[in-house]
Image (cartoon, rainbow, N blue to C red):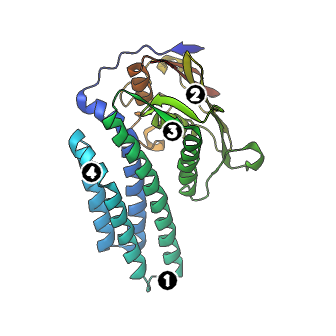
Amino acid sequence: MKVEIQTTLNLKDDQNWKVKLHSFYNLIQALYTETYSLKDLLGNNKHIENIIAVLDKIQAAFSDPQQTKDTLEELSMFRQYITDEIDMTISEGSSLGLSKLSEIEKSLLHFEKMLAVAQDRTDEFLTFIDYKGKRLSFSIESLRFKMKEVFATMASRSGGRYGVAFNAESKGEKDYFFDLQFPSTTEIMLPVLFPDVIRDLLANSKKYSPIGSTISCKLTTDPEVTTLIVHDEGRGIPQSNIDQVVNFGYRGENVTEDETFGDGFGLTKAYMITKEHGGRMFIDSVEGEYTTITIELPTNI
């Protein structure tokens, strides 16, 4: 049954800011994970410790809006520093053996992909700081490309557990099929952080859906309403939890702590941004079968 979410979010200022930065926290955690994997390969290594120190500095800055802005404006410098440290690790690792060097080079590739994604998120978030509460025109082609880039990067870090496909003909048995249905127009007006909402909802769907399943994303617009519908074939949400899942850090009763990655703010952010822009959010879910998230935004605000 399709339920309109009408929960009142009572977030403190720091919680509000943390929700807005949700995607960055997840990216930093992914970079920490990759760094500690390298540390397991190399043991104590000054370059790895330098990378961890940089990640610590970035994450600590997220507690304050001005520090966040200052740090994100320097991200390209941090990105180059991390890449240089990994390059030096490889150049000094001639005694590690070919198998370890191969693993290190894979990690470098993962780092480069994640840092490229982080740069995109940074550009979006700095735009959000400058244009808070406004809508901007987004290229449909760029939206589609960036969605593909994010989920291809995730798949590359899965160790071969799963892949991703973006058309039905190329889908393999272990691939998630992301069916991205975007408007035929070249541009669309959206809230500044709405591309982040789309990514978060798709990532949630992947997280709680079986490998090999289909996740669909349909974005449409007309003069009255802009609509996003994300549908998956996953575990669903218990009916008694549906009106609570947008609360800060809340997880459904059928989700265990050890199988999750991230802080559980994706639906909170989606709902927050929807309400900030005069929209409505609906959830239709059957436990063990599917979940469909629908967001409707007035087009002409």
Quadrant assignment for the C terminus: top left
Between residue 206 and residue 135, name the one nearer to us: 135
Q: Crowdedness of circle 3 by 10 Å Cα count: few (<14), some, many (20+)?
A: many
Mark 2 or 3, nearer chain start: 3
Mark 2 vs mark 1, CA separation in Å: 46 Å
- Which of discs 2 and 4 lies nearer the camera? The answer is 4
Q: Is residue 23 visible?
A: yes
Report which residue position mark 3 lands on: 199
Q: Is residue 26 visible?
A: no
Report which residue position mark 1 lands on: 97
Q: How many numbered marks does the figure carry? A: 4
Identify the residue shown where x is 57% and y is 23%.
227
Q: Is residue 40 left or right of residue 59?
A: right
Report which residue position mark 2 lands on: 236
Q: Position of residue 161 (x, y in %)?
A: 61, 54
Report which residue position mark 4 lands on: 71
Quadrant assignment for the N terminus: top right
Q: Position of residue 15 (x, y in %)?
A: 28, 31
- Which of discs 2 and 3 lies nearer the camera? The answer is 3
Mark 4 vs mark 1, CA separation in Å: 37 Å
